């Protein structure tokens, strides 16, 4: 047994991206939901977002018609889209 040599514990991100290619969740602007509601929905739907990020996403969608929320594997993107839609928001996913 060899001592002093650390085991390799990392992983190759290029292999991970080939196995689980990234998808982007897109939030679309609407005229029905308040800005506060959109920020609360973003924070509840995508727990990794900070309040500042949620506000930035909300304003981007408001002023530009749509905003990228998160990039992740397809199954997770579908989950986040569905959660946003459960709050009455319009969201789609697309391959990155």
Image: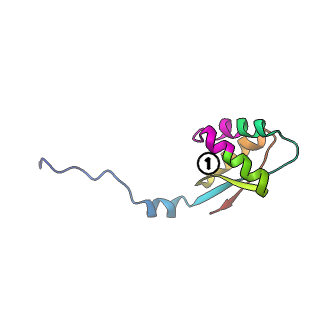
Would you say residue 64 is visible in this rendering?
Answer: yes
Q: Main secondary structure of the magenta part?
A: helix
In-front residue for pair 19/10: 10
Q: Quadrant of the C terminus?
A: bottom right
The span shown in magenta is 42-55
**Residue that sits furthest to the right in the current view:** 31
Which quarter of the figure has residue 54? top right
Residue 46 among magenta residues: yes
Residue 5: horizontal and vertical position, in percent?
Answer: 17, 51
Residue depicted at 47% across the width and 59% down the height: 16
The colour scheme of the drawn protein is rainbow
Residue depicted at 77% across the width and 57% down the height: 64
Which quarter of the figure has residue 44? top right
Is 21 on the left or on the right of 58, as rendered? left
In-front residue for pair 1/46: 46
Tell me: residue 82, above or below residue 93: above
Is 7 on the left or on the right of 53, as rendered? left
For label 1, the SS is: helix
Residue 68: horizontal and vertical position, in percent?
Answer: 67, 54
Q: Which residue is mark 1?
A: 76
Residue 67 among magenta residues: no
Would you say residue 28 is visible in this rendering?
Answer: no
In-front residue for pair 78/49: 49
Give the mark count.
Answer: 1
In-front residue for pair 72/56: 56
Residue depicted at 38% across the width and 56% down the height: 11
Residue 49: horizontal and vertical position, in percent?
Answer: 60, 42
Residue depicted at 84% across the width and 48% down the height: 30
Q: How busy is the neighbourhood of tag 1: few (under 14 within 10 Å), some, or many (20 plus)? A: some
Tell me: residue 72, above or below residue 49: below
């Amino acid at each position: 047994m060899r001592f002093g040599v650390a085991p390799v514990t990392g992983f190759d991100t290029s292999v991970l991206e080939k196995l689980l290619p990234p998808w982007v969740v897109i939030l679309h602007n609407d005229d029905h939901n308040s800005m506060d509601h959109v920020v609360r929905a973003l924070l509840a739907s995508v727990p990794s977002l900070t309040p500042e990020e949620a506000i930035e996403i909300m304003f981007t969608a408001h002023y530009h018609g749509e905003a990228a929320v998160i990039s992740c594997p397809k199954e997770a993107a579908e989950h986040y889209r569905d959660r946003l839609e459960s709050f009455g928001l319009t969201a789609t996913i697309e391959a990155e």
